[in-house]
Image (cartoon, rainbow, N blue to C red):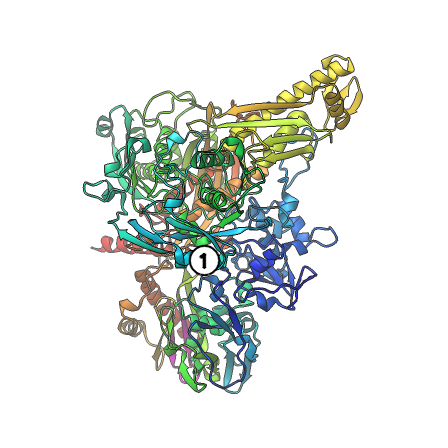
C-alpha cells in the first residue's frame, strides 16, 4: 500500500481497524491532534484530496492512493498559508490544541461558506477563545501590534509560540517519538462503591504483548492527595494510587502495560476482578445523615474532619447578628440554588510519558499545570530523592484547573519503575468524564435582607458541596465558596455554614472559578431578587452595597488577612457595563410577539493567588547571543503568561520581546514554581520575572559603569545594546565582556503570593427568550473588568472572551448526567455539548483604569475571574424577561419552557 | 478512533448472492459512527464501497438513493423543477449535529440504519414516503416503508447480515409542498424535535411526520388539511406519552409541547400558501 502525505510517499500498512488520525501520527505527523477521537471536536481535521475530513473517523485504508494534507503540509516553500498568517495576526488561539484542525477547516472554506460561520465551524470546538479570535482570523482582522523597543507593556503582542502553533510544529505532551514505548490502559470500576475481593491477572498477562499488570498490591501503599498545592496539608490524604476499595464508577482499579494500545485493551478485558458491592450514596445531604455509607473510614492523619459522617471539612462563621439583621429588613429573599457537574473539557486529554535514563533517573513528560509539585508528589509516593526525578511540560493543551492534579503521572511512573521501560498513558475523552475531575456541585441556601433604601442588613448562606469520592480540592474550594462572594458586599451581619461532603461520585476538582462560581450564582441571584422586590435598579442596588476600598473585606470572619485592595475599579466596572447597555449595541430581538426581552447584571470580586503559600522563582540572564534568557517554572496552557513574561522583561530592560528566550515548566531547567493556578501566573510568576528583570538592569548598568570606566548615569540600556557615554556596546559583546570579567550577567529572584490583591468583574446581558420554545438569543453581552494595568490588552480581552464562553457553557448548555447507579450517561462531546461557534455572542470588553499596588507593573490577574458573574447575569436577564426566578442550571430551552409552563398554570389556578 | 479488535476488512463481491456473514461482522459504509465509539464485539468490517453503487438516480418514478450515497452528494443534488419538495432535502441534510466535514464521509444509509431519533435523513425519507430496499442475508430482497424500518431508538428491522441497499422516494411525494420545523437545545445542535408537513397539490392530502421528538418516526395522514382541533386530537391519539424521547437532548414534556406547537405552525403555513 502507498500513502501520500503532504506530497511524500509512505509505504507503511495501517492496521485493519486503524483510523487515519493515529496512522498519520505514527508516520510522524504530530500536527494531527486528538480532542475527542469521535468526530465531534475537529482537532484532527486533515484534507483528503483537498476535502476536509475528521481523520479520527476515516478508516486509514481508505486513504490509500489519495492525497492527504495535514497542517504541516499547508505552508509552501517556507511561506505560511494565508490562513495560518491570519491566525497569527488575529491570535485565533490560546492553548493552540484545536488550532491545526481549525486552520485546516478554515482554509478549506469557500467565500460562500464564510458567510455562514456558525454552520461551517460547528465541527470545530475551541474551549479557550470563545471563538472571537477565530472569527477575526477568518475575516482577516489583524489584532496584533508591533514589538517595539521599550514599548512592550500595554501592547497587544502575539504569543511567542504563534508560528509553531499555526504550523503544527509546537509539541504537546504526546507529540514525540519514544523508542521502546509501552502503552497503558486502565481497568475502571463499574461500581460506585465496592471492595475488591480478588484480582486474577493470569489471563491478562498471557495476552501477547502485555508486559505488566498493576493492581493495588503492586504499587506503594501510601495515602496522598491528587490535588497539587504548595502545602499538601490543605488537602486530605485520602487516596491510594490503586486501592482495594473503589468509591466511584470509573475509579482506576488495574493498569495494564503492553506493546500496543490494542494489547493493553485486550489485557484489560482479560483481568478478572471480583467485587463485593457496597451500598453507595450520591447525594451530599444524604451522605451526612446517620447511617449513610461511610466512604473513608480513615484516621486523623488523613485530615478528614468527620469521616463517620462523610464530612471532609465544615466551616462555621459569621459577624454580627443575622437574626437582628433580618428583623430590621424591609425585604428578604430566601432560596436554594443548586449547581450541577460540569467538566473542564480542555481539548488535550490528561496524558504523560515516563522513562528511566541510564542513571535510573525518572523522567516525566506530562500535561500539567504544576510540574514542580507533581515532582514532589512522585518523590513522596515512590520514596525517591528529589534529584532523581525530572518532570517537565512542553506546551499544554488547555487546563482550566483540571491539570492541577496528578492523574496520570503516578501510575505511569509506577509502570516505568516496574518494567524499566518508557510508558505512555493517554486518557480517552470518555475517561476525562469518568476518571478525572469536575466542578463541585453545590447546594447553596441563601437568605438576604435589606432595608427599603436598599441597604443590606443580613446575609446568611449554607453551602453543601459535593467533593465526590475524594477530597482533592474539596476543602480549598469550600473556603473559596464563602469568601469574596459575600465579602464584596458591605453588611454588618453575616453568617456562613458550609460543608464539603464525600459521595460515591466522580471526584470534583479545581476548575476555573474554584468553588466561587457556585455561590456567586446564588448571591448575585439573591441580590437581584432584593433589588426587584424593592424596585431599585440592580446597578444602583449594588452601588449602595458594594465594599469600598477604605473598608475591610469581611466574609465569614473579620480576621485580618493579607488580601488588600491593591487597586479598586468595581465602581468603574459597574458604570462601564451600565453605560454600554444603556447606549445599546442596536441588536433587536427577533420579530414576533412570543419573544420576551430582559436585561441582567452580576458582579464579582476575586482575590488572586491561594490564601495558602504560592511561590515562583525567575532566573534571568543576558546570553552570549545578546538575547535575554529567562527560566521560569510556571506552565503555559493557553493562559498567555509566556507572552507576558517576555513583555515584562522587554519593558523593564527597554528591549523587544523578540530578544527574550524563555524556558519554562521544567524541574531540571527552572527554579521552583508552585504552579499555574489560582490566578497566580501574572501576580506571582510575573512578579518574580519583574524582580529579576529589575535586578538584571541594575547589574548591567553597574557592570557597564565599572567596565567602561564611566559614571552610571552615563549608561543606558537600549533594546540591542548598552549605551555608555554615547558609545553603543552590542548586547552580545557586552555579555561576553561580563563573562570574561567573571561577572556573568545572571540573576535569580523569587516572588511570593502576598499581599493578595483583588480583581473585579461586572457582566451584563441583554437577551431575548422565546416563551414557547424556551430558546435564548443573547442580544448584547458586556463585560467590565478591573485587572489593574493591562499588560497585553488583546490577550487579556481574549481571556475574558474565553471565560464568558466557558461561563455560558455552564449557564446554558453543559451538564454531566448520571444514572441511578452513579454512572455518567453522556461522556462524549456529542451528548455533553460544549459551546460551539454558533452558541457564543460577541462580548464587548471594557477595562477599568486602575493601577495595582502589588502586581508587576501595576497589573492584576485576569484569566480565571471573568467566569464568575456570567451565569448569574444571564439568569438575572432571564428573570427580567420572564418574571420567573431560576434556581438551578443549565438554563436550557426545555427547562425554561417547563418553568414558564408551570408558572402559567399557577397563574391560572 | 482505532478499532483495535478489527482483524480484517472484507470486500464482498458479487452483486446479488448471499453474504458469508459471521458473528463479529459489521457493514462499513462511511464509518463515521463505527469509528466514533469502541466496538469491542466486532472482528471484521464488510466494506460497502466495494459494491460501487450509483449514489443517486433520478427517474420518472422518483429518486433512488443508494445507502452508500454520501450526505454531501444528496445535499448538492440538482432536482427536476417540479419537485417542490426539493428544499426539504437540504433542510434535512443540514439538520444533522455532524459537521459538513463529516457529510463528506457519512452516508444516507448509515444515518437511516443508525436509527437514532434525531437522524434527519430518516425525517426526510419518512416525510417523502420513502421505501427501504433491503437485501436480506440470503440474497433475497425486501421492501419496507421507512417509517416501519425504524422501530425504536437505535433500533430497526435489519437482522445480522441484512443490508439496506437503497431508499426510493416516489416522484409523487417529491412533487408535494413541504413545511419544515426544527428545534435543538443548542444552536445547530442535535434535534430535539423535527417535524415535516407535506401537502399533496392534487388531492390535498396532508401528512405530518414527527421525528426526533419520538423514539421512532411517526407519520400521520389526513385526507385534507385538518383544523387545529382535529390535528391536536390526532396527535394526542396517535402519539402516547411513552413514545416521546427522554434523553439529554430534550425533556419528553418539552418534545411533546414542541410537537404540538410546530404541528400547528405547519398546518397554518400550508393552509396559507396552498389551497388546491
Which structural element holds mark 1?
helix
Q: Position of residue A67 (x, y in %)?
A: 66, 65
Residue B219 appears left or right of A20: left
Rendering quarter of residue B135:
bottom left
Q: Which residue range is magenta in the image?
A: B194-208
In the rendered view, tell whether residue A747 sits above or below residue A625. above
Quick one: which residue is furthest to the left in this view? A290
In the rendered view, tell whether residue B90 sits above or below residue A530. below
Rendering quarter of residue A867:
top left
Chain ID at mark 1: A
Majority SS type along the magenta span: strand
- Quarter of the image with the C terminus of chain A is bottom left
| Residue A834: in magenta span | no
- Quarter of the image with the N terminus of chain A is bottom right
Task: Choose between A646 and B26: the one closer to the eye.
Answer: B26
Please indicate, yes or no, whether residue A49 appears anywhere in the rendered image: yes
In the rendered view, tell whether residue B70 sits above or below residue A456. below
Residue A634 appears left or right of A229: right
Amino acid at each position: 500500500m502507498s500513502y501520500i502525505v503532504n506530497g511524500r510517499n509512505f509505504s507503511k500498512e495501517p492496521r485493519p481497524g486503524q483510523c487515519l488520525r493515529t496512522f498519520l501520527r505514527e508516520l510522524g505527523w504530530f500536527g494531527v491532534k486528538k480532542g475527542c477521537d469521535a468526530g465531534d471536536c475537529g482537532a484532527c481535521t486533515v484534507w483528503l484530496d483537498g476535502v476536509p475530513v475528521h481523520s479520527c473517523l476515516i478508516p486509514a485504508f481508505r486513504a490509500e492512493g489519495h492525497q492527504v494534507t495535514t497542517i504541516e503540509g499547508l505552508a509552501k516553500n517556507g511561506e505560511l498559508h494565508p490562513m495560518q498568517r491570519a491566525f497569527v495576526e488575529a491570535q485565533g488561539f490560546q492553548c493552540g490544541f484545536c488550532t491545526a484542525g481549525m486552520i485546516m477547516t478554515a482554509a478549506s472554506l469557500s467565500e460562500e461558506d464564510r458567510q455562514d460561520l456558525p454552520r461551517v465551524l460547528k465541527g470545530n470546538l475551541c474551549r479557550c477563545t470563545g471563538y472571537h479570535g477565530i472569527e477575526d482570523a477568518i475575516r482577516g482582522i489583524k489584532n496584533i501590534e508591533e514589538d517595539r523597543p521599550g514599548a512592550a507593556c500595554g501592547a497587544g503582542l502575539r504569543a511567542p509560540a504563534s508560528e509553531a502553533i499555526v504550523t503544527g510544529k509546537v509539541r504537546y505532551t504526546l507529540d514525540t517519538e519514544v523508542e521502546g514505548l509501552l502503552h497503558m490502559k486502565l481497568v475502571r470500576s463499574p461500581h460506585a462503591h465496592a471492595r475488591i475481593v480478588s484480582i486474577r491477572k493470569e489471563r491478562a498477562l498471557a495476552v501477547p504483548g502485555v508486559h505488566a499488570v498493576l493492581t493495588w498490591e503492586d504499587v506503594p501503599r501510601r495515602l496522598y492527595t491528587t490535588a497539587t498545592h504548595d502545602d499538601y496539608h490543605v488537602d486530605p490524604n485520602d487516596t491510594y494510587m490503586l486501592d482495594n476499595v473503589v468509591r466511584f464508577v470509573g475509579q482506576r482499579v488495574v493498569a495494564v502495560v503492553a506493546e500496543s494500545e490494542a494489547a493493553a485493551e485486550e489485557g484489560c478485558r482479560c483481568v478478572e476482578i471480583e467485587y463485593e458491592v457496597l451500598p453507595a450514596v450520591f447525594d451530599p445531604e444524604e451522605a451526612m445523615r446517620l447511617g449513610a455509607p461511610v466512604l473513608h473510614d480513615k484516621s486523623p492523619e488523613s485530615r478528614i474532619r468527620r469521616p463517620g459522617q462523610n464530612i471532609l471539612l465544615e466551616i462555621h462563621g459569621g459577624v454580627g447578628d443575622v437574626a437582628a439583621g433580618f428583623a430590621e429588613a424591609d425585604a428578604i429573599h430566601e432560596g436554594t440554588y443548586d449547581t450541577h457537574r460540569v467538566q473542564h473539557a480542555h481539548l488535550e486529554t490528561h496524558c504523560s510519558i515516563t522513562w528511566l535514563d541510564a542513571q535510573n533517573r525518572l523522567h516525566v513528560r506530562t500535561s500539567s499545570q504544576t510540574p514542580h509539585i507533581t515532582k514532589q508528589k512522585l518523590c513522596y509516593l515512590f520514596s525517591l530523592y528529589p534529584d532523581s526525578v525530572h518532570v517537565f511540560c512542553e506546551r499544554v493543551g488547555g487546563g482550566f484547573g483540571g491539570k492541577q492534579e496528578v492523574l496520570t503521572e503516578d501510575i505511569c511512573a509506577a509502570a516505568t519503575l516496574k518494567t524499566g521501560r518508557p510508558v505512555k498513558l493517554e486518557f480517552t475523552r470518555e475517561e476525562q468524564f469518568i476518571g478525572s475531575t469536575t466542578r463541585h456541585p453545590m447546594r447553596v441556601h441563601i437568605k438576604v435582607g435589606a432595608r427599603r433604601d436598599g441597604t443590606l442588613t443580613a446575609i446568611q448562606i449554607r453551602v453543601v458541596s459535593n467533593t465526590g469520592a475524594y477530597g482533592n480540592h474539596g476543602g480549598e474550594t469550600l473556603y473559596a465558596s464563602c469568601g469574596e462572594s459575600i465579602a464584596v458586599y458591605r453588611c454588618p451581619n453575616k453568617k456562613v455554614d458550609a460543608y464539603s461532603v464525600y459521595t460515591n461520585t466522580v471526584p470534583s476538582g479545581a476548575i476555573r472559578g474554584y468553588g466561587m462560581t457556585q455561590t456567586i450564582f446564588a448571591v448575585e441571584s439573591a441580590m437581584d431578587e432584593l433589588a426587584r422586590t424593592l424596585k431599585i435598579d440592580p446597578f444602583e442596588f449594588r452601588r449602595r452595597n458594594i465594599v469600598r476600598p477604605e473598608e475591610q473585606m469581611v466574609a465569614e470572619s473579620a480576621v485580618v488577612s493579607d488580601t488588600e485592595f491593591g487597586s479598586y475599579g468595581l465602581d468603574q466596572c459597574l458604570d462601564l457595563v451600565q453605560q454600554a447597555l444603556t447606549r445599546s449595541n442596536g441588536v433587536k430581538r427577533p420579530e414576533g410577539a412570543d419573544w420576551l426581552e430582559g436585561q441582567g447584571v452580576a458582579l464579582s470580586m476575586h482575590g488572586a493567588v491561594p490564601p495558602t503559600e504560592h511561590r515562583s522563582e525567575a532566573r534571568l540572564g543576558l546570553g552570549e547571543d545578546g538575547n535575554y534568557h529567562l527560566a521560569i517554572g510556571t506552565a503555559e496552557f493557553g493562559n498567555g503568561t509566556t507572552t507576558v513574561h517576555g513583555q515584562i522583561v522587554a519593558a523593564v530592560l527597554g528591549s523587544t520581546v523578540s530578544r527574550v528566550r524563555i524556558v519554562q515548566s521544567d524541574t531540571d531547567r527552572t527554579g521552583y514554581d508552585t504552579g499555574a493556578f489560582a490566578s497566580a501566573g501574572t501576580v506571582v510568576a510575573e512578579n518574580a520575572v519583574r524582580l529579576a528583570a529589575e535586578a538584571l538592569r541594575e547589574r548591567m548598568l553597574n557592570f557597564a559603569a565599572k567596565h567602561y570606566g564611566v559614571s552610571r548615569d552615563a549608561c543606558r540600556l537600549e533594546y540591542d545594546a548598552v549605551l555608555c557615554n554615547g558609545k553603543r556596546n552590542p548586547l552580545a559583546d557586552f555579555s561576553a565582556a561580563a563573562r570574561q570579567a567573571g561577572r556573568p550577567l545572571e540573576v535569580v529572584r523569587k516572588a511570593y503570593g502576598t499581599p493578595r490583591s483583588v480583581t473585579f468583574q461586572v457582566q451584563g446581558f441583554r437577551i431575548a427568550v422565546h416563551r414557547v420554545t424556551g430558546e435564548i438569543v443573547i442580544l448584547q453581552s458586556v463585560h467590565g473588568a478591573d485587572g489593574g494595568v493591562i499588560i497585553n490588552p488583546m490577550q487579556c480581552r481574549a481571556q475574558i472572551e474565553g471565560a464568558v464562553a466557558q461561563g455560558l457553557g455552564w449557564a446554558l448548555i453543559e451538564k454531566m448526567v448520571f444514572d441511578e447507579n452513579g454512572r455518567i450517561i453522556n461522556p462524549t462531546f456529542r451528548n455533553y455539548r460544549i459551546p460551539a461557534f454558533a452558541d457564543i455572542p460577541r462580548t464587548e470588553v471594557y477595562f477599568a483604569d486602575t493601577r495595582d499596588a502589588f502586581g508587576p507593573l501595576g497589573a492584576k490577574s485576569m484569566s480565571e475571574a471573568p467566569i464568575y458573574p456570567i451565569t448569574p447575569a444571564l439568569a438575572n436577564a432571564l428573570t427580567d424577561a420572564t418574571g420567573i426566578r431560576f434556581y438551578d442550571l443549565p438554563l436550557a430551552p426545555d427547562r425554561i419552557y417547563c418553568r414558564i409552563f408551570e408558572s402559567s398554570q399557577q397563574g391560572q389556578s | 478512533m482505532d478499532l483495535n479488535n478489527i482483524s480484517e476488512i472484507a470486500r464482498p463481491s458479487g452483486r446479488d448472492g448471499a453474504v458469508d456473514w459471521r458473528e463479529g461482522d459489521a457493514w462499513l459504509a462511511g464509518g463515521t459512527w463505527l469509528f466514533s465509539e469502541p466496538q469491542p464485539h466486532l472482528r471484521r468490517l464488510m466494506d460497502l464501497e466495494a459494491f460501487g453503487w450509483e449514489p443517486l438516480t433520478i427517474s420518472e418514478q422518483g429518486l433512488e438513493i443508494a445507502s452508500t450515497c454520501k450526505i454531501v452528494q444528496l445535499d448538492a443534488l440538482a432536482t427536476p423543477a417540479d419537485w417542490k419538495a426539493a428544499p426539504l432535502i437540504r433542510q434535512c441534510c443540514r439538520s444533522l449535529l455532524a459537521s459538513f466535514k463529516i457529510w463528506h464521509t457519512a452516508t444516507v444509509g448509515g444515518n437511516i440504519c443508525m436509527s437514532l431519533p434525531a437522524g434527519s435523513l430518516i425525517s426526510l425519507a419518512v416525510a417523502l414516503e420513502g421505501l427501504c430496499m433491503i437485501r436480506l442475508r440470503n440474497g433475497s430482497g425486501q421492501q419496507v416503508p421507512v417509517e416501519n424500518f425504524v422501530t425504536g431508538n437505535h433500533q430497526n428491522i435489519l437482522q445480522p447480515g441484512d443490508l439496506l441497499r437503497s431508499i426510493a422516494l416516489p416522484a409523487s411525494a417529491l412533487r408535494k409542498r413541504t413545511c419544515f420545523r426544527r428545534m435543538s437545545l443548542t444552536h445547530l445542535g442535535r434535534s430535539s424535535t423535527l417535524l415535516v408537513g407535506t401537502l399533496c397539490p392534487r388531492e390535498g392530502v396532508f401528512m405530518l411526520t414527527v421525528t426526533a421528538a419520538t423514539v421512532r418516526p411517526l407519520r400521520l395522514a389526513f385526507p385534507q388539511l385538518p383544523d387545529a382541533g382535529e390535528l391536536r386530537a390526532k396527535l394526542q391519539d396517535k402519539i402516547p406519552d411513552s413514545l416521546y424521547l427522554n434523553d439529554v437532548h430534550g425533556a419528553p414534556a418539552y418534545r411533546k409541547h414542541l410537537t404540538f406547537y410546530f404541528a400547528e405552525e405547519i398546518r397554518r403555513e400550508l393552509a396559507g400558501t396552498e389551497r388546491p
